[in-house]
Structures are given as structure tokens and as C-alpha cells.
Image (cartoon, rainbow, N blue to C red):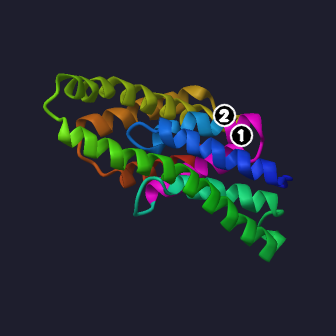
Amino acid sequence: MNIVMQWHDWLALFVQYMVLSLLSVSGAITTVPEMHRFLVADHGWLTDAQFSSSVAIAQAAPGPNVLFVALMGWNVGLNAGGGLAGGVHAWLLGLLGLATTMIGIMLPSTTLTYFATRWGHRNRDRRSVRAFKQGMAPIVIGLLVATGWVLSTGNHAANVPAWHLWLLTVVAAFIVWRTRIHLLWLLGAGALLGALGFV
């Protein structure tokens, strides 16, 4: 995929990720629907497949779950440089995209978290602080459901009926809820079902 990005596009990418950083309640994964809207639907900087692959690969890899943000930035940079065949220029733009998205997503939330946790710890016995903590649970669940919706609807083959995806989503959610099976097994099963043409 080839895209053209000017300096103001890179700035817009950075600002978007800074805003998402402040909205990422319970982690950056909860802002995936907004990232999809911005990167895929509005600007066309990534394809649906690149977007979903970035999330899946980062979730399967060891390390922090925010790595999918780095992969998205990397892919945007590679696309701006003409893909892997673009040579050193594409690789440098990939690194620029990686740095842009990671600094954007980490800087505001890290700063806010540092100051908010210090304040919250000093005031942990206040009724308002306890109520805030309890009120965040339904928001986090809603954001995670929205993330699952985007990932399950945005990347299916045209010749495969959508009910396969919904069935797989419901089964995977049930397994996560009721068992202690490691998520890597579920990712591997999903990859196998994809290779077999089920999804």
C-alpha cells in the first residue's frame, strides 16, 4: 500500500494518539475503535488487514499489550515509504511512525497517571475516590466490547458468512470467561481456523 504523508499528517497522527492516550481507560486496547476510524476509515493510512494484524501480532507477542500501537505506527510509516520494497527510506519512515504513535500514546497518560495516583493514594479514603474507582468498571467493559466489535467485523473474507465470526467471538468470550486457558491457545486456534478458511 502506498500513501503520501506531509508534515501536517505526521503532526495529526501524533496529536490523535495524544488524545487517545487520555481516553485510554484501562489500557490503549480500549481505544482500538477510534484508532480504526482514524487510520483506516478516515485517512486510509492502513488497510483493515494491516490494522487487525497489528493488534493480533502484538497481543500474541510477549511484552506489554501497547505494542500494537507501535506496529500501527510502523505500518503507517512503511506505507508512506512505499512498503518494504521502499528500502532504507521506508524503514526510516517506519521508525518515525513507530516513534510518533508510541510517544503520543505514552506521554500524556503516563504523566496524568503519575500525578493522579499520587493524589488518589493521598485521598484513598474519600467517598468520591472510591465511587470513581467503582464507576470505571462499566466504562472499561463497554470499551472492551467496542474493541471486540471492531476487530470481529472489520476483517473477514467476503466469501465467508459473518455468522462464523460471531460464533467464534461468542465461543472465545465464553472460554475466556469460564476457563483458565491461556489466550495464546485461543489466538493459535483462531489462526488455524483462518488458515482452514473458516474465518
Q: Position of residue 54 (x, y in %)?
A: 58, 53
Q: Are marks 2 and 1 in contact (CB under 8 Å)?
A: yes
Is residue 126 in view from this perspective? yes
Q: Position of residue 157 (x, y in %)?
A: 68, 38
Judged from the image, the secondary structure of the residue bearing numbered disc 2 is helix
**Measuring 61% from the left and 62% from the top, which residue is drawn there?**
99
Q: Is 55 part of what is drawn in magenta?
A: yes
Give the image quarter of residue 126: top left
Distance from disc 2 to disc 1, alpha carbons, whole Å, reads 6 Å
Whether residue 162 sits left or right of residue 29 in the image: it is right
Which residue occupies the foreground of this view, 117 or 143?
Answer: 117
Name the kind of residue labelled 1 in the image. Val
Relative height, residue 159 to residue 60 (above, below)? above
Q: How many marks?
A: 2
Magenta stretch: give its range.
37-60
Q: Can you identify the residue that label 1 sits on?
A: 40
Say whether residue 46 is left or right of residue 112.
right
Q: Residue at x 49, y 53 (%)?
A: 106
Q: Is residue 106 magenta?
A: no
At x 35% / y 50%, what residue is drawn?
Answer: 114
Res. 198 visible in picture: no
198 relative to 158 in the view: left or right: left
Q: Which mark is residue 79?
A: none
Q: Is residue 195 above or below residue 170?
A: below
Going by the numbered disc 2, the residue's amino acid type is Arg
Image x and y of residue 16, in percent: 64, 42
In the rendered structure, find residue 37 and report the number of the disc placed on it. 2
